[in-house]
Amino acid sequence: MIDAFISASRALVAVAVRSLSDVAEEVTLTQYRTLVVLAGRGPQRLSTLAQAVGVTPATATRMCDRLVRKKLINRRVERDDRRNVRISLSESGRALVHLVTSNRRREIEQIVRGITDEDRDVFIKVLDRFTLAAGELPEQDWATGWEI
């Protein structure tokens, strides 16, 4: 099972990299992951965002500085506690995530056309369980985070 997931993950990483090709000069993979976390989970405290992305708070601060300069995120300092910084997705960031997600969706649609109808239900169930076990939101829940 692990070997099958590793093989599938290589294919999915390739799809992810290709879907980012249109915006590769704008963002790194880690920066894009940051945008995805904000799209799916809404505004975050900097420390929470760092943890979700898997970087140190110092790295998250530098990364967010770059994303603010690119106008892909907004940073707001809380009035009552200047140490509490909230990061949110900007409209440009939302548009970038939408573009990349659309590119990825098109390519994955082509790939899954090769899966038979009888395998499709089992495939969906296994992927949904894997997604939840990994701590990610299902697509329908994730997408509503940035469409609101």
Image (cartoon, rainbow, N blue to C red):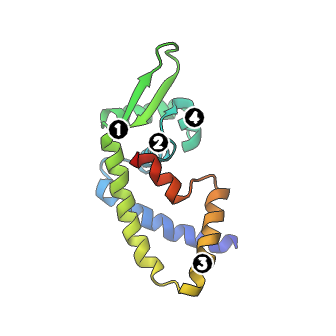
The residues tagged by marks 3 and 4 sit, at their Cα atoms, a distance apart of 35 Å
The residues tagged by marks 3 and 2 sit, at their Cα atoms, a distance apart of 30 Å
In this figure, which residue is indicated by the disc labeled 1?
90
Q: Which quadrant, please, contains the N terminus? A: bottom right
Front-most of residues 58 and 111:
111
In this figure, which residue is indicated by the disc labeled 4?
48
**x 60%, y 76%: residue:** 123
Front-most of residues 82 and 17:
82
Question: Nearer the viewer's eye, disc 3 or disc 4?
Answer: 3
**Which SS class for mark 3?**
helix
Percent x, y for residue 133? 67, 57
The residues tagged by marks 1 and 4 sit, at their Cα atoms, a distance apart of 18 Å
**x 45%, y 54%: residue:** 143
**Which SS class for mark 1?**
loop
Question: Which amino acid is tagged 3?
Answer: Asp
Q: Earlier in the sequence, mark 3 or mark 2?
A: 2
The residues tagged by marks 4 and 2 sit, at their Cα atoms, a distance apart of 11 Å
Estimate how packed mark 4 is, as few (under 14), some (14 to 19) or many (20 or more) residues with alpha carbons within 10 Å: some
Q: Kindly indicate whether the residue at mark 1 contacts the one at mark 3 (C-beta within 8 angstroms).
A: no
Is 70 on the left-hand or right-hand side of 101?
left
Q: Residue 101 — which label? A: none
